[in-house]
Image (cartoon, helix red, strand yellow):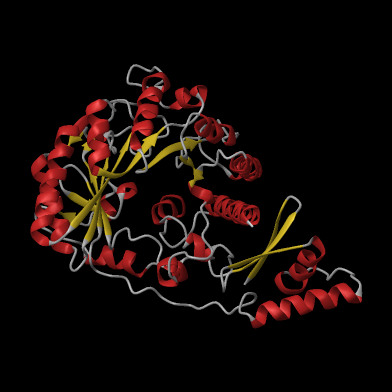
Amino acid sequence: MVHIFNFKDKYYAYDSGSGSLHECDEQTAVYVKAKYETSEPIPELSPEKIAEIENGVKELGKQGLLFKEEIKVFPVKSSEVKALCLHICHDCNLRCRYCFADEGAYHSEREFMSLQTAQKAIDFLIKESGNRKILEVDFFGGEPLMCLETIKKVVSYARSEGEKTGKKFLFTTTTNALLLDDDAIDFFNREMENVVLSLDGRKEVHDAIRKTKNGKGSFDYVIDNIKKFVRSRGDKNYYVRGTFTSKNLDFSKDVIFLAENGFDSISMEPVVTEIDDLAIKEEHLPVILGEYEELCDKYLEKYKEGKGFNFFHFNIDLEGGVCLQKRVSACGAGNEYFSVVPNGDIYPCHQFAGDKDFLMGNVYDGSLNEDIRQKFATTCLFTRDGCENCFAKFICSGGCAANNYHFCGDINKPYPITCEMMKKRIECGMHALAVKKENKN
């Protein structure tokens, strides 16, 4: 499949079969799109121009860089468990309106995971990991730093058990940074492979949603903590992660705000909520898609100024990316990756936590519902409705199973609003990749 698109005055042809991106002029783009991608009338061009285009198409085809046949490789999914998300805390010191986890409570009682349960989860992961040597654990909440001492003991236990069994653990924590003091910073820098810090951008945007228990905005409480942590982090991984809602569709300003405050690794995610005045709706898409283009321009301006930053959704690798089997397999939720809540119950991922239809077992008895697991083990790009004719499929992998289920009722039915945002982000990412490569040359 060849996808023709433009970013303002730049025109591109992306070949999904080979993963090749080609820049072309407008006439070539219009001609190729009309003849090979759509049923639109072929534009009237001079015989010389048509011959030039056809010769170029033919030559790229010979090289396997255009109209290359897509290979349909079904993934062979492992039954070895590689990662757990530990809900170390079903409580939070913030009351964010858009929180999918019911402000930390997951529509149940507020509770902390005991050390014993966390250790059982580590035992479960080791036992079910088979021959895997690298295992991953994400401390999640609620707010994990409300249980910092438990996290420290869990990390120590996992390191010890890992040495006995030949396993290496990589840890991640997601935090709102309200309790990110010197002790937590030192511990994170020693033990965490990655840290995700929640900050929505500009003060007025952040404070409108991310409030403390007493209803005050949390920006002033967390901004200095996050800055201090990032300064101390060195070359270790972190992300400052924001969320945009229908209230701040000008989210490019928030991304640039974060970049200008010294954060060089940024993610800005669309809200996942059914709260009417915050939810992203189809009517918002034209503004959002335009905003991604605005962000892409600003992103490239910063790059040219020598102030470039890593924006998660523009990270497109068309040359050395993951293998085809990995790209079509979607995420490992429900098969290689699970979420464990405070009482030890196991769910496919954190976004399914508390949904009894997806309760898979418990770490205390090591059980796993194989019927549910099989649903997730067999889902992949080629089982997702409508993905076959989408240019983005080998990059997107069919979207998030949880979003698909919660909005469309089926893990194999992609959520159309997310699809449209994803396609625009990919186009912007490809444009950014082309511009940066051109500047290097």
Q: Position of residue 437 (x, y in %)?
A: 61, 56
Q: Residue at x 14, y 52 (%)?
A: 122
Q: Position of residue 59 (x, y in %)?
A: 71, 80
Q: Residue furthest bottom?
A: 62
- Picture quadrant where residue 141 is located: top left
21 w.r.t. 96: above or below = below
In the rendered image, the quadrant that contains the N terminus is bottom right
317 w.r.t. 284: above or below = below
29 w.r.t. 180: above or below = below
Q: Position of residue 114 (x, y in %)?
A: 12, 39
- Left or right of 350, for residue 204: right
Q: Residue at x 28, y 70 (%)?
A: 78
Q: Position of residue 83 (x, y in %)?
A: 25, 56
Q: Residue at x 64, y 57 (%)?
A: 441
Observer-nearest residue: 69 or 358? 69
271 w.r.t. 380: above or below = above
